[in-house]
Amino acid sequence: MFIRGMIASLLMLAPFAAQAQVPDTVTFAPPSPRTDTYPAHMAKFGGGVTGIPDIVYASYSGYRPLTLDLYLPPEGSRPNPLVIYAHGGSFHAADSRFILGIDDFPAALASLAARGYAVASVNYRLSGEAHFPAQIQDVKAAIAFLRANAAKYHIDPARAVAWGVSSGGQLAALVAESCGKAEFAPLPSNSRPILPDVARVQAAHVSDCVQGAVIWYGDMDLNREAPDPALEPFLGCSPCGKAELAATSPINFVTTATPPMLLVNGIADPAIPVAEAAAMARRLTEAGVPVQTLLIPDVGHGFIGKTPEITRAANARALARTAEFIDALFSKAAK
């Protein structure tokens, strides 16, 4: 019994003895880069486009690694302007390879890349993972990552445009409007170990600004009488007041420094009224910002029509107008 008691006493004292050996000050080394030795995987698309999926652009402690898919045109057309795409899904669903109304969205992204653009489709943190402004910070982090690695991916860092649909359209507008705003600045990656391409962003101190934006049926004014219930988990408020809604409404961020925008909407969209796009266009015009609009009849959200043929035609029209807008924004005369 005596021996058992002594053993028990020693076991109880062991943690305290170990604790006493810890130095008064502890210096933690910064995250160190690691090498990703997993074999590279790529996809080939028409027009000589190469797709590189699942590129890690940011890594935050407590979250999954954030990734993007990159579509690169043939080598003869470099360096290439950047098109950064933010998906929809009411901030709680979908991903970089899905869009309403287009069955093979990666092929559609590749068709835009074939025109001479580096097209990046971004996965950002959803509302179940983080509240606003995490989503806009993530899109900006992707822009900064690609600029920091412009030489590797043959990107022209001086020319970038944000494109988004639905909730992603709201993000794309805010990205375009928030150049230099500290509250929306991307966060530094801090998860250990960090890939070298991600670590390069902190060292490069690159810009997250863009030179234009394309908005497909995006919510430009959240301060409506019947706001989307998906906004509460996105904003982290319940109920959300006018101040919270106004703080995430692109219509309230328009300034004379806002870059050119293209607004594309379905006239029969019950989720995002056409009047909202018209109000945004007026606000941009009043600020002296070049703005174009395309209103497509007989289709709703996602440019969904009564028949598959109407849906396909509407999305094809929107894609063509988007390409024309970006072509004009980054004309060959600027190359």
Image (spheres, helix red, strand yellow):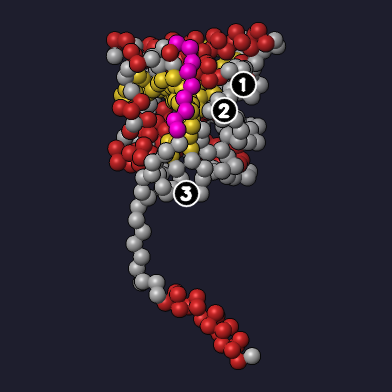
Question: Is disc 1 placed on a helix, strand or loop?
Answer: loop
Compared to residue 26, the image places residue 21 above or below, namely: below
Between residues 182 and 122, which one lies in front from this camera angle?
122
Q: Amino acid at mark 1?
A: Leu
Q: CA distance from mark 2 to mark 1?
A: 9 Å
The secondary structure type at the circle numbered 2 is loop
Which numbered marker is on residue 100?
Answer: 1
Q: Which mark is residue 88?
A: 2
In this rendering, position of residue 277 left or right of residue 57: right
Which region shows up in magenta?
Answer: 39-47
How much space separates mark 3 and mark 2, taking CA atoms?
25 Å
The answer to whether residue 40 is magenta is: yes
- The residue type indicated by label 2 comes to Gly
Q: CA distance from mark 1 to mark 3?
A: 32 Å
Q: Residues within 10 Å of mark 2 (few under 14, many from 20)?
A: many
Marks 2/1 in contact by CB < 8 Å: the verdict is: yes
According to the picture, the residue beneath numbered tag 3 turns out to be 61
Q: Looking at the image, which residue is at 47% across and 49% down?
A: 61
In front: label 1 or label 3:
3
User: Considering only order in the chain, which callout, 1 or 2, is on the residue closer to the N terminus?
Assistant: 2
Q: Residue furthest bottom?
A: 2
Q: Residues within 10 Å of mark 3 (few under 14, many from 20)?
A: few
Q: Is residue 239 left or right of residue 172?
A: right
Q: Give the camera-side residue of 247 and 260.
A: 260
Q: Is residue 183 magenta?
A: no
Q: Give the residue drawn at x 38%, y 11%.
A: 328
The image position of residue 173, as x and y in percent, is: 46, 27
